[in-house]
Image (cartoon, rainbow, N blue to C red):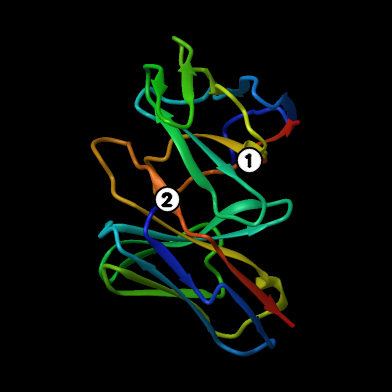
Amino acid sequence: DAGITQSPRHKVTETGTPVTLRCHQTENHRYMYWYRQDPGHGLRLIHYSYGVKDTDKGEVSDGYSVSRSKTEDFLLTLESATSSQTSVYFCAISERAQGLENTIYFGEGSWLTVV
Amino acid sequence: DAKTTQPTSMDCAEGRAANLPCNHSTISGNEYVYWYRQIHSQGPQYIIHGLKNNETNEMASLIITEDRKSSTLILPHATLRDTAVYYCIDGAGANNLFFGTGTRLTVIP
């Protein structure tokens, strides 16, 4: 299994509170990603990083921010949590090979409930 | 949006080969085909990927048609632990993977 650790694994928070999810990798991979998974929508990319301090938005980035100050850590922050952000969040990593070969490995997920 | 088409569900008897088809008719010449699976409440697990040639690893085999418009994932001896949703994805070269709804494989004792 890829060396990816997500924390916390489960969290219940109140609407309007800030929440930070942490992803830690031991593979020294350049790329890191945050996805969310919801019934009927599958996996959707929130943000990704292609290096330290280099990040970009995915398809569902509104309401989320990210930071990557070290290669091994990628943080996802919900500045003011809303009920629509109740979801399972997956961190992923990859190290691109030549061309378009880009095998992405996923963590075990963080279950977030906003009440 | 997902660019692949897979059957919604399949059953397979334990110990038999599971053959999961996927159509990816819009795949471009330099895009890879990737297969992942997701067991309930776990993160997606990488299985195998390929470009043009058939591929085999310790988990599965991937057969890609010559025109690259479809592929088949083969689990040679399915076990109960292989029950999962299997996703076929084309083009992970972009910074994203488009997961569709996948195929729910149920391995039956």
Q: Is residue A106 above or below residue B66?
A: below
Chain letter of the residue beneath label 2 in the structure image = A
Between the C-alphas of marks 2 and 1, the distance is 20 Å
Q: Position of residue B70 (x, y in %)?
A: 54, 18
What residue is disc 1 on? B81
Chain letter of the residue beneath label 1 in the structure image = B
**Camera-side residue of B67 and B82:** B82
The amino acid at mark 1 is Arg
Residue A105 numbered tag: 2
Q: Position of residue B80 (x, y in %)?
A: 67, 37
Label 2 CA crowd tier, 10 Å (few <14, some 14–19, many 20+): many
Image point 69% across, 76% down: which residue? A113
Image point 42% across, 60% down: which residue? A33
Residue A80 numbered tag: none
The amino acid at mark 2 is Tyr
On-image quarter of the C terminus of chain A: bottom right
Q: Secondary structure at mark 1?
A: helix
Task: Name the residue at the top extreme.
Answer: B66
Q: Quadrant of residue B14?
A: top right
User: A82 left or right of A56?
Assistant: right
